Image: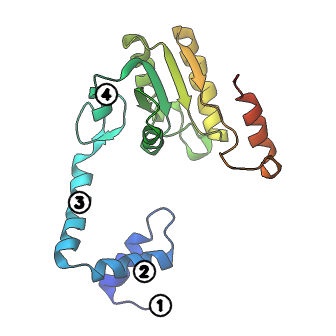
């Protein structure tokens, strides 16, 4: 399709977003063009504001406009319990449950030799220094069960166990409302391994 240059550029920029294909990018671009000039200015200012102000927390590496972040600054949090996640999106997902009341540590990725990402590219050194200093009694590894996730969990557990801290991993298994007959072998295996007494 042929678009005037500014519109084509806008569509091209939207296509750079993860999971946005050509048609979605076109819909987003046309939506922006239909916005009032004031609303478009607010959107543009919000993007610039977030890009300029949001940084990694110096303690946990979560994304925040303040340092330390809102979670690290919260006095009501259990400072002896730490949940390790791969990125800020995982932290937000756990916070949505309102079940975890401890602190977090964001690794800023997973170990992936194929992508050229070794342990030195992650915030592992900072994690290892936090655990003894903050007297953490348990580290919960909330990392996806992928090849990279399993490699990262294995690596972290070998480094954390000598510190005398309990190391656990969240359970994986069947989603609520699903049928056993449709579950794959790995999901069923994880569900059995993660079972608990009732």
Residue 99 visible in the shown view: yes
Q: Quadrant of residue 3?
A: bottom left
**Circle 4 is placed at which residue position?**
72
Label placed on residue 1: 1
Mark 4 crowdedness (10 Å alpha carbons): few <14, some 14-19, many ≥20: many
Q: Which residue is mark 2?
A: 26
User: Nearer the observer, disc 2 or disc 1?
Assistant: 2
Whole-percent x, y for residue 176 in the image = 65, 45
Instruction: Please give the label number shown on residue 13.
Output: none
Residue nearer the viewer, 116 or 133: 133
Q: Earlier in the sequence, mark 4 or mark 1?
A: 1
Q: Nearer the viewer, mark 2 or mark 4?
A: 4
- What residue does disc 3 label? 46
Asked if disc 2 and disc 1 are in contact, CB closer than 8 Å, the reply is yes
Q: Nearer the viewer, residue 96 or 130?
A: 96
**Callout 2–callout 4 Cβ contact below 8 Å:** no
Q: Determine whether the residue tagged by mark 2 lies in a helix, strand or loop.
A: helix
Task: Please tell me whether mark 1 sits on a helix, a strand or a loop.
Answer: loop
Q: Residue at x 58, y 13 (%)?
A: 161
């Amino acid at each position: 399709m042929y678009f005037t240059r500014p519109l084509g550029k806008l569509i091209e920029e939207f296509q750079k977003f993860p999971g946005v294909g050509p048609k979605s990018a076109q819909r987003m671009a046309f939506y922006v063009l239909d916005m009032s000039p004031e609303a478009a200015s607010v959107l543009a200012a919000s993007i610039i504001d977030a890009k300029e102000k949001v940084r990694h927390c110096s303690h946990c590496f979560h994304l925040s406009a303040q340092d330390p972040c809102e979670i690290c600054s919260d006095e009501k949090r259990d400072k002896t319990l730490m949940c390790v996640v791969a990125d800020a999106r995982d932290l937000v997902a756990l916070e949505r449950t309102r079940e975890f009341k401890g602190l977090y540590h964001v690794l800023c990725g997973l170990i992936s030799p194929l992508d050229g990402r070794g342990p030195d590219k992650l915030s592992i050194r900072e994690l290892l220094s936090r655990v003894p200093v903050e007297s953490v009694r348990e580290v919960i590894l909330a990392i996806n069960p992928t090849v990279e996730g399993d490699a990262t969990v294995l690596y972290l557990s070998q480094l954390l166990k000598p510190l005398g801290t309990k190391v656990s991993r969240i359970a994986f298994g069947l989603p609520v409302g699903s049928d056993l007959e449709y579950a794959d072998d790995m999901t069923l295996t994880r569900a059995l391994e993660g079972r608990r007494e009732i």
